[in-house]
Amino acid sequence: MKTLSIAAVLSVLVLSARVSAQVGSPDISNAHHVGRLYLKPAIALTNLGVDTNVFNEADQTQPESDFTLTVTPQTDLWLKMGHAWLTGNLKEELVWYQTFASERSANPHAMVGLTVPLNRVRFGVNAAYLNTRERPGFEIDSRSQRRELSYHGSVDVRLRPKTFVGLRGDRMTTGFDSAALFEGVNLREALNRTVTSAAVTVRQQLTPLTAMTLDVGRGEDRFEFSPLRDSDSTSASLGVTFDSIIKGRASFGYRDLQPLSLSLPPYQGTTAAADLSYVAFGTTRLGVQATREIQYSFETIQPYYLLTGVTGSVMRRIARPVDVVGRAGVQNLNYRDSIGIVVAARNRIDTVHTYGGGIGYHLGKDVRVGFNVDYARRASPVLTREYHGFLIGTSVTYGL
């Protein structure tokens, strides 16, 4: 496992210089600068403790526990170039297990973007790269190596003082390692794919801090080694963005997914996404994340599922240096069966419940030390896919 990351090196280089935010710039408050380059480094020990079910194994297989820690250094970057802003993020998650060396990993992530605001037109492009062994979602329990490379481009034109029309395009490639196996399935052959989409957007600025956006788009999913999974889709969504007492974005939409193979079932139905937070009385922060979207399965007889989930959290400052946190969530994986194939668990639904909480102590402005307990349980008609386990440990967050 790597012992030093790019983000960690940048964090060390900029310990000494602080600047305040400038009017009209991105949020560079409490950032550091090296010449014209602004940086906001941070490092977090997200867990130092015990994982009671390292491999998410079923109860009858006697799950194994291990001592583990995860350290995540990262740095946000901004560079002003005339009217344009070059932005970036460098992050690396360092995961260590005491006994099970196979579960150790270094997971780098990098993002770079360019925004060019002109008089009535705004251009934006960005690219992101991820190389990780972390689990890709709620379905696959093995930590398998995969790489993700994504691109995004957009252009907005202001038609009226508060009305904008634009185009956007996205492309994302996912590739698993050739040795990545789960439940006897080669994940590279099942899930390597490229997702391409384009959309027309209309945005109305309702207030200086609230906007509504309508997206209508077309996309295609193409699988490198499993062309029978290829599909085209049409989607539309209406979203609202908040940046006041409530912060974040929520959207609700419709998706028409049409597989190119007649052996795969189509999907026509609703989609949703939300990531919202609210601060009450300056001492209590409420957060909610929700999703309803198609996800591809590694299983050939049930090639995709509809993931519907919601997670909520509450953080309350009970004294000036002390806070408490509670969180809970539920995720439903509603599988769709291949047409004409006998499936042991028809119309299968797996459910994952998560619960957690903790207490934190603030050492000055930039350091928080916490103790956390998190519990997860998955229920499934397939008994070998059921599991439960705790993750218990200490966390330390330090914004440099």
Image (cartoon, rainbow, N blue to C red):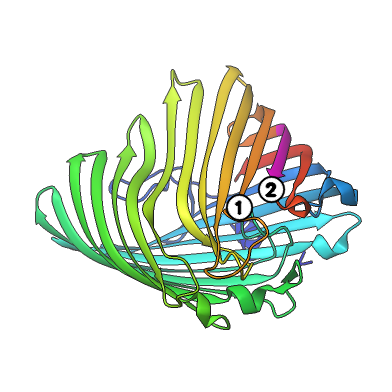
Name the residue: 88% across, 59% down.
100
In the rendered structure, the answer to whether residue 172 lies left or right of residue 157 reads: right
Q: Using the rendered view, name the quadrant where residue 215 is placed.
A: bottom left
Dot 2 or dot 1, earlier in sequence: 1
The span picked out in magenta is 370-379
Name the residue: 56% across, 22% down.
316
Question: Measured along the vertical axis of the image, is residue 309 above or below residue 337?
Answer: above
Identify which residue, 124 or 36, lies in the foreground. 124
Amino acid identity at mark 2: Ser
| Residue with the mark numbered 2 | 380
Q: Picture coordinates of residue 175 (x, y %)?
A: 59, 76
Magenta: main secondary structure equals strand
Total residue callouts: 2
Name the residue: 64% across, 67% down.
299
Q: Count residues near mark 2 (Cα–Cα under 10 Å), then give few for <14, some for 14-19, many for 20+.
A: some
Is mark 2 in CB contact (under 8 Å) with mark 1?
Answer: yes
Name the residue: 57% across, 21% down.
317
Q: Picture coordinates of residue 224 (x, y %)?
A: 54, 82
Q: Picture coordinates of residue 359 (x, y %)?
A: 69, 26
| Residue with the mark numbered 1 | 348
Question: Measured along the vertical axis of the image, is residue 161 above or below residue 37?
Answer: above
In the rendered structure, the answer to whether residue 240 lies left or right of residue 375 reads: left
